[in-house]
Every structure is written in C-alpha cells, then in structure tokens.
Amino acid sequence: MSLSERIASRIRTEGPISVADYMAEALLHPTYGYYTTRDPLGRAGDFITAPEISQMFGEVIGLALAQCWLDQGSPKPFTLAELGPGRGTLMADLLRATKQVPGFHDAMQIALLEASPTLRSRQAETLSGHTPLWLDTLEALSEQPLFLIANEFFDALPMRQFLRDGDGWREKSVGLQDGKLSFGLGAAAPQPALAHRLEDTRDDDLVELCEAAQPMVQTIAARIATHGGAALIVDYGDWRSLGDTLQALRAHAPSDPLKDPGSADLTTHVDFEALALAAKAAGCTHSRLTPQGVFLERLGITDRAQALAARLEGDSLQSLIVAHRRLTHPEEMGNLFKVLGIFPMQASPPPGLNA
Ligand code: SAH
C-alpha cells in the first residue's frame, strides 16, 4: 500500500487530519516517509542546500561559533550540536575550519539531532574521523554549554495552518474528495496560541503555527541561558509569517503538496518571531533577524572565496564564483534566507549578528 493510500485510510477512520499531521506522515513515516527513505540532497536529489553549494558556508559558520566559544571564555567541555545535519557536510566543513582553534576540538562533544536512519548513516560516513552522538530528542542534550547550528531544519517541521474567521480560526485540513487527498477547512474555533495574530490579520488571512518548534527552541535556549553558548538558526522565512507557505519540491521543481506523499520534500517558511519568543521565554536573548547574504559577508566569506580562488582556474574557478553569488546575492539565497542568533542575556551576539 502506498503512503497516499495509508493516509487516505487513516482519514476514513479518523476524519480529516491537520496539515501538520499530513507533513509528519509525508516526511517522517518510519517506512515510507520522504526523509526516512532517501538522501534527498544534491543535484540528483530534489533540492540543494547552502552547505552542499559550497564548503565556505560551513567554514565561516564554524569560525563564528568558535569565536563565540572563545568570547565566552573557552568553556570545557561543551556540546557542538547540529539539528537535521543532512549529509553531514556542514559539520565536516565546520570541523575542518576549526581544527586550528586552540582547545576547541579537545573540548567539544558533537551531538546531532537526526530523525532519518538513512541520513544518520550518511552522516556517520561523512564524519568518520569523529565520534558524534546521535540524539533522539533535544532533552538528551547534556547540561553544559551548547553551541548549535541548524540550517534548513525548522522549515521541515510539521506546521498547522489556520484561516481567520471573525475572532476565531478555521484549521486547514487534509481530507478526501472523490477518494483523493484534498484540502478542507474545519469549523471556526478560538486559538489561544494565535491571540497575537488577531492584531495583524483580517478575515480569510492564513497564518501558520509550528507547535513542534517551540519546545525545541525552549530546550536549546534553556541550556544556553544556564550554561552559556549560542545557537544559529538559518532558514527561509520572515519575522511573523502571513499566507500559505507550504510547498513541495521534486527534482528541483515545485510540485503539488498532496500528490504522492513521501516522494517530494515538503517545507514551510519559518516564523522567526515564534522562535525568538520561545528563546526569550527560556531566559535567552536573540539577535536581529539578518539576511544570510549580509551575515556571510560580515563573516568574511568574500575573503575566503578570494583565498580559494587563488588556487583555482577554469571551470572550478567559475563554480566557486557562482557558489559565492548563490549564497550571498540578494536575488539568490542572500535575502530569502535569514539568520537568527540566540545567546545568553549577558553575552555579546555571535559574529555577523547585531543585538
Ligand atoms: N541541514 C542540512 C539538511 C537539511 S534537510 C543541509 O543544510 O544540507 C532537513 C534535515 O532535517 C534532514 O537531515 C532531515 O532528515 C532532518 N529532519 C527533518 N525533520 C526532522 C525532525 N523532526 N527531527 C530530526 N531531524 C529532522
């Protein structure tokens, strides 16, 4: 039975399911989920991410995290964590770039949060010279300073969607029409978690609520508030999202999110305000939301590109120039992707970010 048929049979017994439940089934079903069954990254896959575009991304982020660690007095031991590490490329680039930082590698314990067994083994291969610990939940993070990176992780978490109706909200759902998966709407009901969205929305506006992200950010921020550290969250999205941002990507092209679940990537834009509020609730402060291009430029990605360029020519030089542009240019990833830093109240913000 295909995943589509399994979801249809769940709907026949339970009734329509939320968009979040649909995303969870499509992405992480233990046998048929998109991430559980494959390595979706790279040119031959469905999408490509910043660390897969260029080694420079992980390198400058690694040096930024190491600088935070130095600025906070080089605590030992500390956790170096990544959420959703994909192929492990970012972590490998980060580790190579920080090898020269005195004491950093001796003090670090690498922790990876990864739901997909396929990608866990891929990460183990990429990081074969190291001994990472794979976590099932963030609660398992050690009680010690935490320096963390998450790139394109929060966009993959299940997201609920609501349509404004007076002072209430109708939840968007996935049900069946003529036997096929189709979107529907539930009855209007109050939603305390969306109280602040009554200020900036009108009837029929759609807002999104990522209930999975909040406890995760709170756990991370609680470690950082208590023991020190910093978290860098990189993703596409904005401060307070508005409108339907659910999208499916198959072979680098947009596709119907309800078509053949489990075979395409599903993402939504990240609502960074919600992450920032969760960080504050756990006793941390956060940076201004900063475009990825600005952040990478401040971290010196252009100097790094020039240093690499000096050793290249022909096609490889051309690909380096294209990669630098893709990561930083406002018309490519530079503006679409944003960076949020989370750090202790009394600490200075991570390099590249302003308080
Ligand atoms: N950060 C990588 C990969 C991004 S794809 C990169 O930039 O290339 C999203 C990653 O998050 C994948 O590794 C996926 O398996 C993982 N993931 C998605 N949902 C998850 C969840 N709920 N818990 C843990 N890992 C998850």
Image: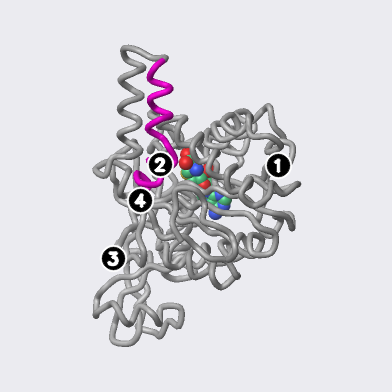
Mark 1: give few (<14), some (14-19) or many (20+) Cα within 10 Å. some
Q: Dots 2 and 3: beta carbons under 8 Å?
A: no
Q: Are marks 2 and 1 in contact (CB under 8 Å)?
A: no
**What residue is drawn where x is 38% and y is 67%?**
208
Query: In this rendering, would 297 be left or right of 154?
Result: left
Going by the numbered disc 4, the residue's amino acid type is Pro
Is 351 magenta? The answer is no
Q: CA distance from mark 3 to mark 4?
A: 20 Å
Sequence-earlier tag: 2 or 1? 1
Left or right placement of residue 105 versus residue 123 in this view: right
Q: Earlier in the sequence, mark 4 or mark 2?
A: 4
Q: Which residues are magenta?
A: 291-310
Q: Does the magenta stretch mainly form a helix, a strand or a loop?
A: helix
Amino acid at circle 1: Met
Callout 3: helix, strand or loop?
loop
Residue reaching furthest to the top: 314
What's the distance in space between the residues labelled 1 and 3, CA to CA? 41 Å
Give the Cα distance between marks 2 and 1. Answer: 24 Å
Which residue is label 4 attached to?
291
Circles 3, 4 touching at the beta carbon (< 8 Å): no
Residue 108, which numbered label?
1
Q: Residue at left 31%, top 64%?
A: 177
Foreground residue, 196 or 125?
Answer: 196
Query: According to the image, label 2 marks what residue?
Result: 296
